[in-house]
Structures are given as structure tokens and as C-alpha cells.
Amino acid sequence: MTSTTNTSKPVEKLKCPFCGFEGESKLLKTWKYAGWDVYFYQCSNCGKKFRWQVDPTGVKKSFIMRVGVGKRSR
Ligand SMILES: [Zn+2]
């Protein structure tokens, strides 16, 4: 059996943890961290950046919110 595996960019429709926008966020870069695949996205709606980590097995996934720009009003 021949199975073609396309290793294209993972364009997932993520839900922005900041504004709740659901759609295609811009993938800025990817790297490996502690065995995880880390995807660094920028929301195409509010422009905020967040990390999206996926376990190599694809089972565990987690968001890591990160505010690049913005002021803390507290
Ligand atoms: Zn957003």
C-alpha cells in the first residue's frame, strides 16, 4: 500500500484564547520544546499571539497564552 503523506503546514482552525475568534490564525513559526511541537500563532482578528503546543503523539494539546503587546490595566 502506498500512502502519500503530505507534510504541509498545519492549518488548524483554532479558537483564539483572547478574543474567541474562530478561524485561520497566522502561523508565525514552529519549533520543538521539551518534546512538544510548538506552534506560534497570531490571531488574525485581534492580532495577539499565542502558543499552541501539541504532543508528538497528538493526544495532548495545550494553549499557552502570551500577550506580546498590550498594557496591563491593573
Ligand atoms: Zn484573537
Image (cartoon, grey):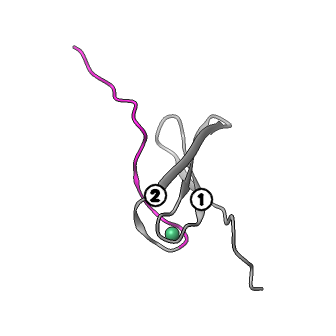
Q: Dividing the image into 4 quarters, which one contains the C terminus?
A: bottom right
* Quadrant for the N terminus in the image: top left
Query: In the rendered image, is residue 68 in sight?
Result: yes
Residue 25, numbered label? 2
Which segment is the magenta one? 1-18
Percent across and percent down for residue 6 are 34, 29
Give me the C-alpha separation between circle 1 and circle 2. 10 Å
Q: Amino acid at mark 1?
A: Phe
Instruction: Assess disc 1: are there few (<14), some (14-19) or many (≥20) residues with their C-alpha within 10 Å of its C-alpha.
Output: many
Secondary structure of the residue carrying tag 1 is strand
Q: Position of residue 69 (x, y in %)?
A: 69, 69
Q: Earlier in the sequence, mark 1 or mark 2?
A: 2
Q: Amino acid at mark 2?
A: Ser
Q: Residue 64's image quarter? A: bottom right
Residue 45 lies left or right of residue 47; in this view the side is left
Is disc 2 placed on a helix, strand or loop? loop
Indicate yes or no: mark 1 CB to ligand 1 under 8 Å.
no
Give percent across and percent down for residue 9: 43, 39
Would you say the magenta stretch is mainly helix, strand or loop?
A: loop
- CB of residue at label 2: within 8 Å of ligand 1? yes
**Which residue is painted at 59% across and 59% down in the image?**
50
Q: Is residue 73 left or right of residue 24?
A: right
Q: Is residue 60 magenta?
A: no
Residue topped by disc 1: 50
Residue 72, position as x, y percentages in the image: 74, 79
Q: Is residue 19 above or below residue 62?
A: below
